[in-house]
Image (tube, rainbow, N blue to C red):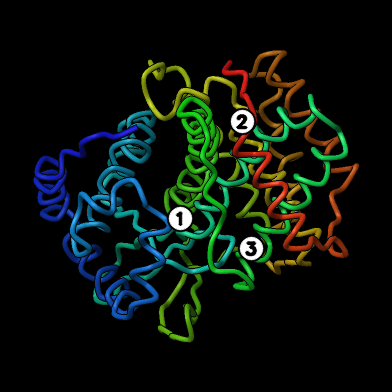
Amino acid sequence: MSFKIPVDDLLKEFSNYYKRMEIQIDYIDSLDSKYFLDESSIEELKKMYPEIYEQIPLNKLRIIQNVTFRQDVVEPLLNSMDGSEKEKLENIWVSFLPISSINAKSLHVPNTKIPTIILYDKVLGALHFYAESYLIARELEKIDARIENNFLKYSVRVILDYLQKKRHDIPLYHLPYKIKERAALWATAQEVFIVAHEFAHIYLNHLETSKSDRLIWDGKKINVKEFTYDQQQEFEADLQAFRWIMNLKKQDLDNSLLAFIKNIGVSAEIFIFFHIIEENLKEISTTHPASKDRLRYIYENIKDEISKEEREFIESMFQSIDLGFDIKDFKISKESEDFLNLMVNNIKYDII
């Protein structure tokens, strides 16, 4: 499906953002430029954005990505806040870097007290692939439950290897547009939580402590100063994020990328994603509580304010976490991978 991107309009909108957040944008650009000087980085971009790469020059691609994400996700989230909340956060720039960490970060911007938020391309790409894989698995289950099970394990293995840099790309399936769209809606509902969580740290004044860190990608090391939080602050940021998402779902979202937020459980599903990573990579954080504990804290504090359907959806997630999804010993041959990919690309999908 071809489409035309309004590049000129988006660049004009970027200039408006730049007037408000010049220092933050210039700082992120100084980091970003260090990553995209070599050919391998350009190839990475082509794989991440195959539909739009031909329409947009490389030096404009990151700007377009940032502006569209701002319009589709960040601005609706800000508009769900009350006046004082929005006023405190609306001039925080949210941007991207190609790091394989599973967390977003709030960074200290030199020579200013205003932080900036960075998200990681690879995590967002993994979220979209995870959403696609879930929808594909539902179709494979109708054919053979064993194939479905192997496909889910394979998909998680791909994500884990991708985040560990054991593989450099994620499979691009030839799926019907409606399936791609549904997966994008699913993943975007979880991306909203990531942004809201970082906004919450800033809004709740969790910026007392920071540490020097190094962002590493393709052997490059870039020094930054990131804000750090204790476990109670992580719980508090999670809950505040969901309070905003609960406000956001009251808006007219039918024709937006945020349509799936009408069921708050879809955003909460990101904790299943985090749990799978924790279980298989042993990603133990000294600050972030376990994903199940974070989900439980949110649920206990909002359960009386959400619908029965949403409560049941979240309760089913606790069951999934308890069942576990340990695939550390799962391996798949090249022949099996080719077979699964062939099946995926030739399924007759039931479009819901």
The percent coordinates of residue 115 (x first, y second) are: 35, 63
The quarter of the rendered structure image containing the N terminus is top left
- Label 1 or label 2, whichever lies nearer to me, is 2
Callout 2: 10 Å neighbours few (<14), some, many (20+)?
some
The quarter of the rendered structure image containing the C terminus is top right
Please tell me which of labels 3 and 2 falls first in the chain. Answer: 3
Choose between 102 and 303: the one closer to the eye.
Answer: 102
At x 11%, y 40%, the residue is 9
Q: Quadrant of residue 80?
A: top left
| Residue that carries the numbered disc 1 in the rendered image | 205
Mark pair 1, 2: CA separation: 28 Å
Label 3 amino acid? Answer: Asp
Q: Secondary structure at mark 3?
A: loop
Please tell me which of labels 3 and 1 falls first in the chain. Answer: 1
Mark pair 3, 1: CA separation: 13 Å
At x 72%, y 35%, the residue is 137
Label 1 amino acid? Answer: Asn
- Label 3 or label 2, whichever lies nearer to me, is 2
Q: Secondary structure at mark 2?
A: helix
The percent coordinates of residue 249 (x first, y second) are: 48, 22
The percent coordinates of residue 275 (x first, y second) are: 75, 51
Q: Secondary structure at mark 1?
A: loop
Q: 140 above or below 283? A: above
Disc 3 to disc 1: CB gap under 8 Å: no
| Residue that carries the numbered disc 2 in the rendered image | 266
| Residue that carries the numbered disc 3 in the rendered image | 230
Choose between 214 and 233: the one closer to the eye.
Answer: 214
Choose between 91 and 330: the one closer to the eye.
Answer: 330
Mark pair 3, 2: CA separation: 26 Å
